[in-house]
Amino acid sequence: MLKKMILGSAVAAALILPALAEKPADNAPDSPRAAKAKLGQALFFDPSLSSPAGQSCATCHDASAAFTDPDRRLPVSKGVLPGRVGNRNVPTPMYAAFSPAFHFDKEEGLYVGGQFLDGRAATLEEQAKGPFLNPLEMANPDEQSVVEKVRRAAYSPEFDRVFGKGALDNTEQAYARIAEALAAFQRTPQFSPFSSKYDAYLAGKTKMTQQELRGLRLFESEDKGNCAACHPSKPGPRGEPPLFTDFTYDNLGVPRNPDNPFYKLPAQLNPAGAQWVDRGLGASVNKRSEDGKFKVPTLRNIELTAPYMHNGYFKTLRGTVVFYNDRDKKPLCSKNRVSEDAALKQKCWPAPEVITNVNHDELGDLGLSEREIDDIVAFMHTLTDGWQAANSKQ
């Protein structure tokens, strides 16, 4: 537990400090960095880059929903092709730029960093290449088809200005540059503004309510919520803001989501059908010992990013905290596929999707009261970016 907290703080310091130290000229409107990011922005919002046209990155990563899917009717996102859906809940790319490259930390004995919930992409650039070719998302048949669409786009001349003459001539290089531009856009302050009420509180610019303060204490207390074990909440050694993730992977014992439409996709897209099990990190590193583990998400903007967990099982933030609190105290439900709402009413929890590797050390029997649960939720609401003092109620 303590090791994970130290690891999270060290990673945050190592990654945030260089970003804070960037010279203003690096981010000036006419700088090469800004030009690349602007190009990435054009790509991010271009709906012509799917096959057929109609779905952009922003379709499933809407700024108004902290760059997650604004359509809450499904726990996963729809693909551009009718009837196709993803197999996982869409994670926010906010603050993803601070995740270290995917690696195994030999000292801690843990996998750390990377992108996607299962860490299958080492970097933002590698991650940006994935959705274009995913048959459940933008469904392009190959890299060449994506590059050809970019060549026809109104912004295509910008590639020569940013990367040099002939930047789109070679398909492999062009595809890499498309990903590089998208990654540059995700490294802009739009994706990591650090503008929540909690940030203002840490800066001494506002006070939190009594309930929010109680929630913070519970969040950090090792004998209560213990949330900070994986979601570090304290500033780094030089005052760098906390990221509320340690970038590691964990199996929380989340049940199958009976509302996930991926189970019903045809065999060519989901050969296992209703028996499909999401192995998470285990599939990425090809190790059964890592099955069921998913990347610890940032809790920044958690208020805006429902549903929660890799499969969107939890529709409410409070229900998620309740699960952390009493997962190991309540009996198993009589059926494995029971929704969050039904489980709360029946006072049971379904069996974990992957029963091995479940974290019993840091959650499952926290002993929180109903008021304490509400307090933690209230604190997490202070992590929403865009807070303004004039709109706060002390």
Image (cartoon, grey):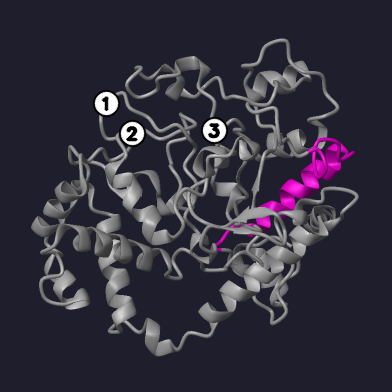
Which label's residue is closer to the chain start, 1 or 3?
A: 1
Q: Residue at x 69, y 63 (%)?
A: 8
Q: CA distance from mark 2 to mark 3?
A: 15 Å
53 left or right of 290 in image: left
Q: CA distance from mark 1 to mark 2?
A: 10 Å
Numbered circle sitting on residue 136: 2
Which amino acid, mark 1? Pro
Q: Could one spot residue 299 in this view of the protein?
A: no
Magenta stretch?
360-386
Instruction: Report if residue 374 lies within the magenta region.
Output: yes
Q: Is residue 367 above or below residue 216?
A: above
Look at the numbered disc 3 and give the secondary structure of its residue: loop
Q: CA distance from mark 1 to mark 3?
A: 21 Å
**Which of the two residues, 309 or 140, is positioned nearer the viewer here?**
140
Q: Is residue 219 above or below residue 37?
A: above
Residue 231 at x, y percent in the picture: 70, 56
Which amino acid, mark 3? Asn
Q: Residue at x 42, y 60 (%)?
A: 124
What residue sits right under mark 3 in the picture?
A: 311
Look at the numbered disc 2 and give the secondary structure of its residue: loop
Numbered circle sitting on residue 82: 1
202 left or right of 78 in image: right
Single out the mark in the foreground, 1 or 2: 2
Residue 257 at x, y percent in the picture: 57, 24
Q: Residue at x 61, y 64 (%)?
A: 196
Instruction: Report if residue 208 lies within the magenta region.
Output: no
Which label's residue is closer to the chain start, 1 or 2?
A: 1
